[in-house]
Image (tube, rainbow, N blue to C red):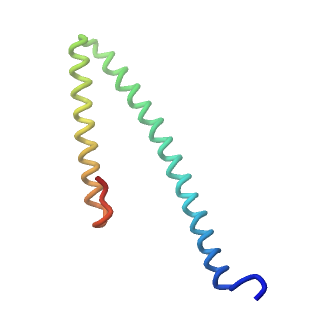
Amino acid sequence: MLFGDPVEWEHARTLQDAVHSLKALLDLQTKEILSLRQELRSVEGEKARLIHRLNLSHRERVFLRETLKRIELTLEKALDSSNDKSRPEGHKTT
């Protein structure tokens, strides 16, 4: 055959479709990450404004920020643990 084996062409087309699908998925995930980063910046700004409005002493503000940071870290660890449990065996990240 002049242009190659039709089975090879079908495999190449399948691989090309898979690459296009993966690129589209990556684009969607990138947009979601950018959106989440923007939302995080907004939440951080609102948190700073609220802390400022409490009219606390410097020591109290530092204590509040440290306490909030510990809570956030605890929540992140719980979320990571939950995500690890939902992954199939052999796919857990460390």
Question: Does residue 27 appear to the left or right of 68 in the view shown?
Answer: right
Along the line of sight, the residue nearer the viewer: 33 or 51: 33
Which residue is found at the position 44% from the left and 36% from the top?
A: 39
Question: Does residue 89 appear to the left or right of 25 in the view shown?
Answer: left
Along the line of sight, the residue nearer the viewer: 17 or 49: 17
Q: Please provide percent x and percent y for residue 30.
A: 52, 48
Which residue is found at the position 27% from the left and 36% from the top?
A: 72
Q: Residue furthest right?
A: 2
27 relative to 49, above or below = below
Q: Where, by quadrant of the figure, is residue 55 drawn? A: top left
86 relative to 31, above or below = below
2 relative to 79, above or below = below
Which residue is found at the position 28% from the left and 57% from the top?
A: 84
Along the line of sight, the residue nearer the viewer: 5 or 44: 5
Q: Please provide percent x and percent y for residue 90.
A: 30, 65
69 relative to 8, above or below = above
Q: Where, by quadrant of the figure, is residue 2 drawn? A: bottom right
In the picture, the quarter occupied by the N terminus is bottom right
Q: Please provide percent x and percent y for residue 62.
A: 24, 19
